[in-house]
Image: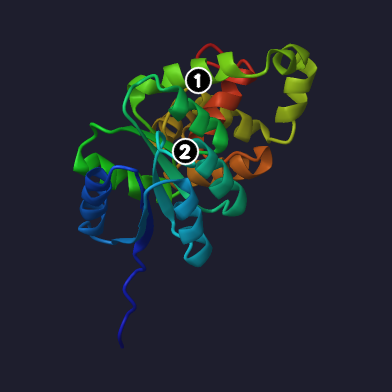
Amino acid sequence: MSTLAPASLRIVVVDDQPLERAGNALILDSADGIEVIGEAGDGAPALALLDRAVPDVVLMDVRMPGMDGIEATRIITERHPAVRVIVLTTFDLDDYAFGSLRAGASAFLLKTTTPEALVSAVRTVAGGEAVVAPRLTSQLVEHYLASSEQEARRSRSAQTRAVRLEVLSPRERDIFSAVARGLNNAEIGAELHLAHSTVKSHINSIFAKLQLRDRVHAVILGHELQLGPHD
């Protein structure tokens, strides 16, 4: 009896620099279980590609002529909620990259990342996790919160924050607090004495209840709700 081979992850690569775009496409297309189904030089042709064939992951440059990566990411995540976007940025503190986070990106990678790290990020993001270089995480959160609308943040009372978390069970609140502190699933399991599969199941439930795309946005919400290492 024959068995079906697992489907390849389908990737679209978007970058206005032809050599860099071709290089990243070659790296990904050469990896086991990954297929590059299209390339584009800016956001508009990328959207046209997605109208014809929806990928699992889009590798998105942010600084491009025409439609930049921020606007393209916003439209992609609105039209295709299941598609994950990995943003490539040149500098650690890049306003374009932070804007893409607000637009719904699930990962940030520096353009100096290794081919191995790029392939790993694609697989991780396709599996529903978020990827941010560890040294960027606190900077991302601080910049994101600093750029939020001040009035909205002032009006968010402690009571409102508590109400937001009331949809979670006590165990889910413990796990959400751990996620907000930056712990991964293995660390959460060790801290709360839970199996890896149990932690993953709870996190999926938390993301659904709080309408979060992934871990990056969970960390941001945790900081907005004033959760942290001492909570």
Q: 91 or 81: which is nearer to us?
A: 91
Location of the C terminus (image quadrant): top right
Which residue in the structure is indicated by mark 1?
141
- Residue 109 in the figure: left or right of residue 101: left
Q: CA distance from mark 1 to mark 2?
A: 22 Å
Give the secondary structure at mark 2: loop
Vertical position of residue 226 compared to residue 12: above or below: above
Give the secondary structure at mark 1: helix
Q: Earlier in the sequence, mark 1 or mark 2?
A: 2
Q: 189 or 97: which is nearer to us?
A: 97
Q: How is the image coloured?
A: rainbow
Location of the N terminus (image quadrant): bottom left
- Residue 51 in the figure: left or right of residue 168: left
Q: Looking at numbered disc 1 in the image, what kind of residue is underneath it?
A: Val
Q: Nearer the viewer, mark 1 or mark 2?
A: 2
Around disc 1, counting alpha carbons within 10 Å, would you say few (fewer than 14), some (14 to 19), or many (20 or more)?
A: many
Residue sticking out furthest to the front:
66
Q: Which x, y percent locates residue 184?
A: 41, 32
- Residue 30 in the figure: left or right of residue 225: left
Q: Which x, y percent locates residue 208?
A: 63, 45
Q: Circles 1 and 2: CB distance less than 8 Å? A: no
Vertical position of residue 163 compared to residue 52: above or below: above
Residue shown at 60% from the left, 41% from the top: 207
Vertical position of residue 107 compared to residue 24: above or below: above
Around disc 2, counting alpha carbons within 10 Å, would you say few (fewer than 14), some (14 to 19), or many (20 or more)?
A: many
Rendering quarter of residue 96? top left
Q: 96 or 212: which is nearer to us?
A: 96
Q: 99 or 202: which is nearer to us?
A: 99
Residue shown at 54% from the left, 21% from the top: 144
Q: Which x, y percent locates residue 200?
A: 49, 44
Circle on res. 61: none
Which residue in the structure is indicated by mark 2?
68
